[in-house]
Image: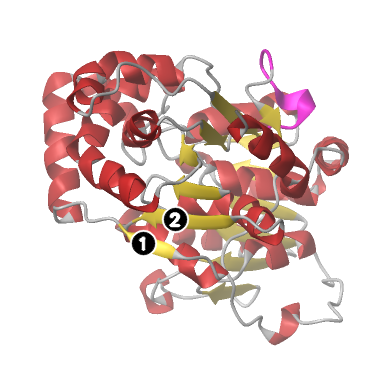
Amino acid sequence: MRVLFLPIPAIGHAYPMVPLAWALRAAGHEVLFGTALGGLAVEKAGLPVVEVELGQDRPEALAKSAEKLAEKDPALHAKLRERGDAGLDSLEEAVPFFAERSAEFTDVLVDLARAWRPDLVVHSSLYGGALVAAAVLGVPSVECREGFGRSERLSVLMYQHMKEVFADYGATGLPERRAGTDSCPPSMIDGPRDGWPMRHVPYSGGAQLPAWLMPPIATPSRPRIGVTLGSGSDAWRLELAASILASAAGLDVELVLALGDVDPDALGAIPPNARVFGWVPLSALVPTCTALIHHGGGGTTLTALEAGVPQLVLATGADNGINARAVHNRGVGISARIEEVDTALLHRLVTDDAMRSAAGQVRTEISAMPTPAEVVPRLVSLCEP
C-alpha cells in the first residue's frame, strides 16, 4: 500500500504524522510526504519527502493573506494571528480562511498525487487541497487530528467553500471513504470521539543530547521547568522568554529553555538557575521536568500529557486557546495570559499536587490508547474494495 502524507507545510503539522508514517513503513508499506517550508524537517526522521512548490515567497504570501483577511473579517484575523487575545472558539471558524489558502496551491498537491498514485492520503485538518487530491484519485482520505479542536463537519464545510475548486479537477464531492485519527485522551474529550483513537507518540526531531540528558539521567536536585515557545524567532517570543526568566530568577527551580534558532544574547542576562538551548527533543526533555511552559500547540500539549507533567499554557492565537482551555478544564495545568506570568504563578505550577495527580491520570489514559502500529490495520481495511 502507498500512503501519501500531506501535512499543512509547517513543522507543527508535519511532526505529529511521523510516528504513523514509521508504523506504516515498519509494516511494509510505502510512504511519501509532500510538504514545504518547516514541514520539510520530516526528512530528518528518515522519511522520503517531496517539496511542493507553493509558488510564492512565504513572508510576502502570509502578509498578503493577512491583509486580505483583516479587511474581510477583522475578528477572525485577530483570532488567528499569534499573540491573539483569545484565539479560535472552534476550528470551524477558520474554514473560510484555510479554504482560500488551500485553493492557491491545490494544483501542486493534485499533481503530486497523480504522479505517485497513492492508495491513501493522510492529511492535516483544514487542508482542503489534500481532500481534492484524494477525491480526484478516488482514494480514501484520513484526517490526522492533533490537539483538542473538534468538529466532524470540517471536511464538509471545507468542501462547501471549495466546490468550484473540486469541480475544476473533475471531483463532484469529497472522497467517498473518509476517516480520521484522534489523539485526544478519553477524559479530555468534549463530545463524541472524533475519529479512531490513536496514542500520541511524541516526536519533535532528533538531536545529539546534551550531557545532562544522556543516560543514566540523574533526577534533578530541584524542580525543573521546561520552556518551549514554538518554532520561529519572533520578537515577542524573546520578550516572553525574558519575562519567564525574570519570574523564575528568585525560585529554587532549574529552568531549561528549548527555543530553537534563538540567539541567547538577545535574552539579556541569564540567571544562574537557567539553561538556554536550541533544539532539544521534547520527548527527552519533558519526562525529566516537573512542569512545562509552552505556547499551546497541539503536539506540545499532548507531549506534556503523555509524560504526566503539569503545564502552563500561554496561548498564542489560532487553536492554541482551545488546547489551553482543555488543559485548564481537566485540571492538568494552568491556562494564563502572557502578562500574568510571575513568580507566584511559576511557584504554583511546580507545587500544585492536584494538577500533578490529574496529569498522572491522563498519562495512564494515553498509555492505554492504541499505538500507531495498532491503527495501521484499520488504514489497510479502509483501502480494501
Asked whether residue 125 is drawn in magenta, I would say: no
Residue 138 location, quadrant: top left
What's the coloring here? secondary structure
Nearest the camera: 175 or 228?
175
> Is most of the magenta stretch helix, strand or loop?
loop
First in sequence: mark 2 vs mark 1: 2
Nearest the camera: 114 or 62?
114
Total numbered labels placed on residues in the image? 2
> Mark 1 belongs to which amino acid?
Val
Q: Residues within 10 Å of mark 1 (few under 14, many from 20)?
A: few
For the point 69% across and 24% down, the residue is 329
- For mark 2, what is the residue? 33
For the point 70% across and 35% down, the residue is 378
Give above or below for 251 relative to 322.
below
Left or right of 35 on screen, residue 102: left
Q: Residues within 10 Å of mark 2 (few under 14, many from 20)?
A: many
Asked if labels 1 and 2 touch by Cβ distance under 8 angstroms, the answer is: yes
Left or right of 319 on screen, residue 37: left
Q: Quadrant of the C terminus?
A: top right
Residue 212 location, quadrant: bottom right
Q: Helix or strand or loop: what does disc 1 sit on?
A: strand
Q: Helix or strand or loop: what does disc 2 sit on?
A: strand
Q: Position of residue 150 (x, y in %)?
A: 55, 22
Q: Position of residue 107 (x, y in %)?
A: 21, 41
Q: Position of residue 3 (x, y in %)?
A: 52, 48
Left or right of 198 on screen, residue 312: left
- For mark 1, what is the residue? 50
For the point 27% across and 21% down, the residue is 96
Q: CA distance from mark 2 to mark 1?
A: 6 Å
Give above or below for 73 relative to 316.
above
Q: Which residues are magenta?
A: 184-192
